[in-house]
Amino acid sequence: MHTSPSRHGGLSAYGWDDSLELSFAAHRAAGHEPVRVIAVDRGRCDVVAAAGPLRAVTGRGLDPCTGDWAALEPGGEPRLAALLPRRTAIVRASAARDSHGQVLAANVDTVVVAVSLTTALDAGRLERLLALAWESGARPVVALTKADGTEDVSDVLAEAAAAAPGVGVVATSAVSGEGLPELTALLTGTVVLLGPSGAGKSTLGNALLGADRLATGAVRERDDKGRHTTVRRELLPLPGGGVLIDTPGLRGVGLHNAAEGLDQVFPEMERLAADCRFADCAHEAEPDCAVLAAVESGELPPRRLASYRKLLRENAWAAARTDARLAAEQADRWKTLKRHQRAMYRFRDRQR
């Protein structure tokens, strides 16, 4: 929903609109003001309000993330009183590999997956990042970076497009400016940069921002790996409208309940599976399996099927752990309730 800049002051540049204003009515009646979280750091966070940036304390029980909209309780020490419901969220499996997900960014509209052209394309990793992006509810775009260091990018463009059906793929160079207008045309609202360290995210981000706002670092020649020059997620306004979130390089990206994201990345699997003899075909060795037939005919690359199977197994494992955790939490709640009931009955018996 479009909102004129004058209606919501400085927050319009950060994405505040009429629907957010409507959902904020109860908070405003309580004397709170809306803010957007720019960065989070050890129990405190940088936020932007209508009047400008502030440093705030994180309220008890809140776990804000860059991109969140929040209700600020003003005073001598500003404090976040509540978080507004997230429209979208990029969630990966936590570093501890437990059943909880880690939110990388909230209320994102476009996810730019950065892939360096100076190394061979890892299609499996690209598919993994795209599943993460699709599952968030945002729209992914693939930016092939460092095109100035590559003579012919046509083969990599084709390979990336095959791994990213329905996604815009653009070869870019922050040095020459190649592809930047085409990439910018695909960006809307809140944009987040995702990719491994050394992919050129911060350099690309600076080109989109039109200024050196993000720290960059050199990569090692032997493996094209870079230092994590971005150490925290930070939200910055883009000159043409919208905002940009840069993220630290991702060494590993575990999927967290990303079934819908996988369906988006591998749409051909559902289409082919509809012609399998068995409705529950696992596409392993079943007779009249349309997926395996597509591999034999060359319609479906074996690598693509192997990647799908790998990500599907990983996602199923993560979902099972989440279900087990929720079941355990429910059991704990019932145990606590029963203990309270028994204590109440004993107290009543003593009063008779």
Image: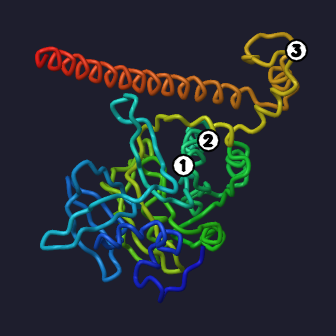
- Colour scheme employed for the rendering of this structure: rainbow
Q: Residue at 22%, 66% (x, y): give it.
A: 56
Among the 4 quarters of the image, the one containing residue 92:
top left
Identify the mark at residue 288; answer none if there is no mark.
3
Q: Above or below — where is 101 with respect to 236?
A: above
Alpha-carbon span between mark 3 and mark 1: 35 Å
Q: Please identify the quadrant where the C terminus is shown.
A: top left
Q: Residue at 41%, 50% (x, y): give it.
A: 104
Of helix, strand and loop, which one carries label 2?
helix
Alpha-carbon span between mark 2 and mark 3: 27 Å
Of helix, strand and loop, which one carries label 1?
helix
Of helix, strand and loop, which one carries label 3?
loop
- Mark closer to the chain start, 2 or 3: 2
- Mark closer to the chain start, 3 or 1: 1
Query: How many numbered marks have been drawn onto this rendered protein structure?
Result: 3
Residue at which label 2 appears: 261
- Mark closer to the chain start, 1 or 2: 1
Q: Above or below — where is 299 with respect to 6?
A: above
Q: Above or below — where is 191 with respect to 323?
A: below
**Mark 3 and 1 residues: CB-CB less than 8 Å, in contact?**
no
- Tell me which amino acid carries mark 1: Ser
Q: Does residue 152 appear in this view? A: no
**Mark 1 and 2 residues: CB-CB less than 8 Å, in contact?**
yes
Among the 4 quarters of the image, the one containing residue 298:
top right
Residue at which label 1 appears: 136
Q: Residues within 10 Å of mark 1 (few under 14, many from 20)?
A: many
